[in-house]
């Protein structure tokens, strides 16, 4: 797929540490202003890929461009135009919000630093706390400060590595409103997350497992491509019947959702017939359900093999 104004356009990226291949043949295109979600279990290669894209790691193989710069030979140019927010808060606890931002501004050698710091404080709602020490902030306010520091040098691309881990639901919602505001202003965002509700807020998604890209596309396209049929099974004692459901013909996965079990498979007719007999025998209830992203990603993980397993 050729995207107009592709901000990220890479093919076949690989990264090895010793004899372990952490990223294997990764390809991706991301358009200007797109919010692209990066999903996958811990250890799937998301952080390593992000670090290759922002110039912190050099790929061992592959090719491509980020912000028009060669990912193999122009890492310094990429760094100047990228805002990278790491998983862990990496600013200084014993400096105030304002002092942290001025410190970052000095490191970038920003012209008009005071104006840019004041602008970041206002846009992220930090002005009233500008003199508060960073170490005393809650997770949500630390998140805002980290984002403000990423935006000081007016990057064209934001790379966000699990930015909302450990913050409360309101702070996560506010954060995503800000991400969509930045996207509307033309800033491209690549964000890794474990939260399915956040994945649904992205324009497009990529799912990695064991260093390999399993699928990419819009959430709706990814769900449709897997061809899953999903049913919700509910009733008294249903949670004790999980293993019995897994043994039925055409059942490929069973997952708990509240007081229901979501049962999925790709052979819709056989699955429905098996479930109708099962619920009648156990006096349960059966209802058709729309496959969710979580259903699909669990299904993808079942088909992915850990290359380190014998």
Image: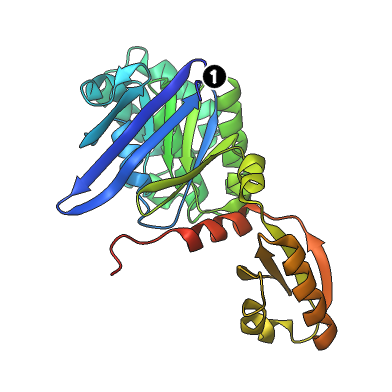
- Identify the residue at image location x=36%, y=28%: 10
Which scheme is used to colour this image of the protein? Answer: rainbow
Q: Is residue 146 left or right of residue 264?
A: left
| Residue farthest along the left direction in this orientation | 18
Tag count:
1
Query: What residue did someone put label 1 on?
Result: 186
Q: Is residue 287 left or right of residue 120?
A: right
Q: In which quarter of the image is residue 102?
A: top left
Quadrant location, the C terminus? bottom left
Q: Where is residue 273 in the image (x, y as percent from the top left)?
A: 79, 72
Q: Where is residue 306 in the image (x, y as percent from the top left)?
A: 35, 61
Q: Is residue 286 visible?
A: yes
SS category of the residue bearing label 1: loop
Q: Residues within 10 Å of mark 1 (few under 14, many from 20)?
A: some
- Say which of 105 and 60 sits in front: 60
Q: Is residue 142 left or right of residue 125?
A: left
- Identify the residue at image location x=46%, y=35%: 190
Q: Position of residue 233 (x, y in %)?
A: 77, 73
- Identify the residue at image location x=71%, y=59%: 229
- Whether 79 is drawn above or below 143: the answer is above
- Whether 256 is drawn above or below 61: the answer is below
- Identify the residue at image location x=51%, y=25%: 1
Q: Position of residue 270 (x, y in %)?
A: 73, 68
Q: In this view, does 227 lie to the left or right of 24?
A: right
């Amino acid at each position: 797929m050729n995207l107009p104004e592709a901000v990220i356009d890479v093919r076949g990226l690989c990264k090895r540490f010793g004899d372990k291949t952490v990223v294997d043949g990764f390809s991706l295109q991301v358009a200007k202003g797109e919010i692209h979600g990066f999903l996958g279990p811990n250890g799937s290669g998301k952080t390593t890929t992000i670090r290759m894209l922002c110039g912190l790691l050099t790929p061992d193989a592959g090719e491509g461009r980020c912000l028009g710069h060669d990912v193999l030979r122009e890492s310094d140019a990429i760094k100047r135009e990228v805002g990278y927010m790491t998983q862990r808060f990496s600013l200084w606890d014993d400096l105030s919000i304002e002092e942290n931002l001025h410190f970052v501004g000095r490191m970038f050698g920003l012209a008009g630093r005071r104006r840019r710091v004041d602008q970041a404080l206002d846009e992220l709602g930090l002005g009233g706390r500008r003199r508060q020490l960073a170490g005393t902030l809650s997770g949500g306010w630390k998140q805002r400060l980290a984002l403000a520091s990423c935006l000081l040098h007016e990057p064209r691309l934001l790379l966000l590595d699990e930015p909302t881990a450990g913050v409360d639901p309101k702070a996560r919602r506010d954060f995503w409103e800000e991400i969509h505001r930045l996207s509307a202003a033309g800033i491209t965002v690549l964000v890794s997350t474990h939260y399915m509700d956040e994945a649904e807020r992205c324009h497009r998604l990529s799912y990695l497992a064991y260093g390999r890209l399993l699928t990419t596309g819009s959430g709706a396209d990814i769900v449709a491509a897997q061809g899953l049929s999903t049913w919700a099974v509910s009733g008294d004692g249903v949670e004790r019947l999980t293993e019995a459901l897994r043994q039925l013909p055409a059942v490929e996965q069973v997952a708990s959702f509240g007081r229901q079990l979501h049962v999925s498979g790709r052979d819709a007719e056989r699955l429905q017939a098996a479930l109708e007999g099962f619920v009648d025998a156990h006096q349960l209830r059966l209802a058709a359900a729309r496959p969710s992203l979580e259903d699909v990603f669990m299904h993808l993980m079942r088909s992915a093999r850990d290359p380190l397993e014998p």
